[in-house]
Structures are given as C-alpha cells and as structure tokens.
C-alpha cells in the first residue's frame, strides 16, 4: 500500500536586548503505511524542548501502532488502533522514561480546495491512574502545489508523579513540499 511520510522542524527563540534568552527545537516525524483498504501501520516521533511552565526541559515520544482504517474515503479518514509508546520526559530534577501499551487515533479531512484538517492522539498508561497524552491538531492551507501555511496546536499532559505537568503550544508555520 502507499507509504506517506512527513517531517516537520521548527525553531523558536525569545530575544531580549539583543540576547537570545530561550530557544528550542521541535521535531515531528510521521510514517503511515496502508496495508490494505481496512488496515494500517503507523509510527510517530515527537520532540519538544524547553517547554513553558513547570521547568520541563524536554518531552519526546515514539509511538508505533497498527489498526483499522474507518471512514476511508478520498478526503476523510479515521485511523484507530492499539500500539506501543515510549516517552522520555526531562525536567530540572532529572528525567523519566515511561513505556507501555498505548492507544493511537488519527483523523484527516480534506476539502476540494486542498485545505486539510487533521489530528492525532497518542496515549500511554491507565485511564484511572497515571498516564501520558500527546495530541496535535493541524490545519494545512496550500498556497501553491509546493508552498502553504500551517497552523498547529501541540498539547501534552503527564500525570506520572515524576515530571507531572502540561504543555500547550500554538504555531504558524510555512510548509514546503519537495
């Protein structure tokens, strides 16, 4: 089946009186493989650095999943399935690694004009106890076949006792397709 890949790199910094006070790199890599009309394999890697609030320095997550393609059409699709998640969380006190069975969900909708809305959620942990969530929403607005604007919202939530906290970021990006 078709393999779809996407790589996003973004860099943010705050400058005060000519001196960079805070900077971070954000990376997101996605791979999707359609096995047939009803099944898929997916992989997601995210890295967020120097997140605001709570002294969190880094959150990385790698998720692999397999599951079912629902509402499969030319412009609308829902993918859901079990997976396995590795999470690496770091703050000023140190770092923690969490891993375990997870749940993966991805939804994608595209208008005839090419404007697309998509969202992905990756979850690891138990619903009643400690958990780690990573969610991202994305709105793609193509200007040309290769150039466009992108609005993204990334949200992560960790309730494990170590490195507990939330992070939420909105970004405007310029996209380019080779």
Image (spheres, rainbow, N blue to C red):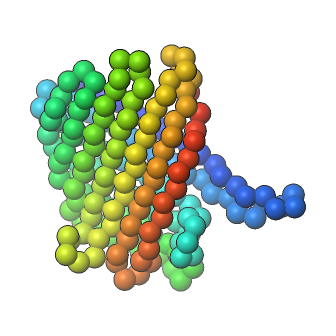
Q: Which sits in the foreground, 148 or 80?
A: 148
Residue at (31%, 31%) from the top-left corner? 109
Q: Which sits in the foreground, 53 or 113?
A: 113
Percent coordinates x, y for residue 97 in the rendering: 38, 71
- Kindly indicate the quadrant of the structure image that contains residue 131: bottom left
Does any portion of residue 80 appear in the rendered image? yes
Percent coordinates x, y for residue 122 in the rendering: 30, 55
**In the rendered image of this protein, does residue 80 appear above or below residue 155?**
above
- Kindly indicate the quadrant of the structure image that contains residue 148: top right
**In the rendered image of this protein, does residue 81 appear above or below residue 168?**
above
Q: Is residue 90 left or right of residue 99?
A: right
**In the rendered image of this protein, does residue 11 appear above or below residue 129?**
above
Does any portion of residue 177 appear in the rendered image? no
Q: Is residue 82 left or right of residue 43?
A: left
Work out which residue is located at the far right of the displayed protein and give it: 17
Percent coordinates x, y for residue 40 in the rendering: 20, 36
Residue at (75%, 64%) from the top-left corner? 21
- Kindly indicate the quadrant of the structure image that contains residue 115: top left
Percent coordinates x, y for residue 124 in the rendering: 27, 64
Residue at (34%, 75%) from the top-left corner? 159
The quarter in which the N terminus is drawn is top left
Residue at (50%, 72%) from the top-left corner? 90
**In the rendered image of this protein, does residue 3 appear above or below residue 95?**
above
Exactly how many numbered labels are in the figure? 0
């Amino acid at each position: 089946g078709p393999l779809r890949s996407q790589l996003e790199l973004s860099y943010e910094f705050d400058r005060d009186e000519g001196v960079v006070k805070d900077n971070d790199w954000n990376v997101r890599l996605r791979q999707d493989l359609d096995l047939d009309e009803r099944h898929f394999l997916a992989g997601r890697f995210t890295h967020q650095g120097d997140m605001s609030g709570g002294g969190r320095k880094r959150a990385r997550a790698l998720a692999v999943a397999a599951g079912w393609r629902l509402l499969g059409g030319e412009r609308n699709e829902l993918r859901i399935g079990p997976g396995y998640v590795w999470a690496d969380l770091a703050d000023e006190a140190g770092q923690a690694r969490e891993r375990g069975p997870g749940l993966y969900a991805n939804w994608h909708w595209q208008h005839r004009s090419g404007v697309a809305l998509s969202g992905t959620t990756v979850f690891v942990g138990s619903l009643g106890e400690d958990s780690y969530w990573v969610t991202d929403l994305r709105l793609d607005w193509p200007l040309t076949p290769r150039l466009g604007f992108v609005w993204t919202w990334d949200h992560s939530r960790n309730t494990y006792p170590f490195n507990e906290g939330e992070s939420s970021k909105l970004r405007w990006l310029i996209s380019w397709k080779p």
